[in-house]
Image: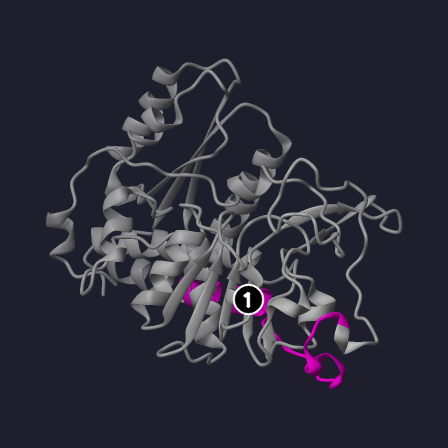
Amino acid sequence: MAPPSLLSDLSSSATARLLPFRALAAAPRIFRCHPPPSLPPFPSKSIPTRLTLCRRSSSSSVFGVAAMDSGASAKVIDGKLISKQVKDEVAEEIAAMKAATGHVPGLAVILVGSRKDSQTYVRNKKKACEAVGIKSLEVNLPEDATEEEVIKHISEFNNDSSVHGILVQLPLPRHMNEETILGAVNIEKDVDGFHPLNIGRLAMQRRYPLFVPCTPKGCMELLHRYGVEIKGKRAVVIGRSNIVGMPSALLLQKANATVSIVHSNTKNPEEITRQADIVISAVGVANLVRGSWIKPGATVIDVGINPVDDPESPRGYRLVGDVCYEEVSKIASAITPVPGGVGPMTIAMLLSNTLESAKRAYNFK
């Protein structure tokens, strides 16, 4: 928890919040598990659109890693299990807060338009709030709503003492300026944690942000709860987005890891990644990270959620991560599955951040 003095250091200036996984959603939907050597390691328009499934080869020489034939299998880092633990802890604290103060946390969500995916996200957040005892408020505006209408609702929530977190569901309609709208959110209620002052304090020694971004916070929670040693270890974060990659790197650094960031202009990304004890991948490219990228015994956190065509699935597609699970699980010591890994942790951390905001508001320890 941030020290009380932090509030005096942070102003109510413009916030710049971005939707988790927005950058991932913009990436190509399908990536070959066995790309030709001429292809770049990151997405491009020339990437083929037919899916080739990730499968373990019987020959370790394909990946250059002898551990592939050891028969070992990585420990599965169960995000569903940990998220349930976090939610149970949040619910317990909320019950104690209600008994002591008569108040519960409040989370407000503003949805503009009728995108099915956005409606699903909002519905899941609302259900999660109800399950732990957080009061959930929701504003649904039509696609042709004006920026002024959205800001009016944000202003009302800013001034509502029963609301401790405000989310504007992204993406917004094209006629709206996201920076302007998100800038209207009071930083003390920015439970997504993307305000520049929050990120800035995350980057500074002996400073603490008011909120930590939900998905990176979830990654760290998984590492901590599974007893993965971070201090003094080498970590690689694949992807440098403001919503996942960069905050994840800052959190690892704050936990005293030696951190490298691999991105679209990195030369020899495979070689750099193979040096890591901890790998966090968040680029939104299906099966990008192969067995040859991983150091034997490394811990792998896969943030990617990529739909790929699968005629054998009743839905016609299935979800895979950035990591070629079938290969990497034979080399790593621990790995998150997709789905069921980082995904459930994002909402759990949102609930945790909302609780922390309410605890500060009511001075509840």
The magenta region covers: 62-91
User: Is residue 215 shown left or right of residue 13?
Assistant: right
Could you classify mark 1 by the number of other residues whose Cα lies within 10 Å: few (under 14), some (14-19), or many (20 or more)?
Answer: few
Indicate the amino acid at tag 1.
Answer: Glu
Of the pair 131 and 216, the residue shown nearer to us: 216
Quarter of the rendering occupied by the C terminus: bottom left
**Magenta span contains residue 188:** no
Q: Residue at x 52, y 18 (%)?
A: 142
Colouring style: one colour
Q: Is residue 14 above or below residue 293?
A: above
Q: Is residue 258 above or below residue 190?
A: below
The x, y position of residue 47, in whole percent, is: 71, 41
Q: Residue at x 15, y 54 (%)?
A: 6
Residue 167: tell me if it is visible.
Answer: yes
**Magenta span contains residue 73:** yes
User: Is residue 27 shown left or right of residue 192?
Assistant: right
- Helix or strand or loop: what does disc 1 sit on? helix
Q: Residue at x 76, y 56 (%)?
A: 34
Q: Quadrant of residue 63?
A: bottom right
User: Is residue 82 shown left or right of residue 91?
Assistant: right
Of the pair 288 and 191, the residue shown nearer to us: 288
The x, y position of residue 105, in whole percent, is: 34, 50
Residue 133: tell me if it is visible.
Answer: no
User: Is residue 317 shown left or right of residue 112?
Assistant: right
Residue identified by numbered label 1: 271
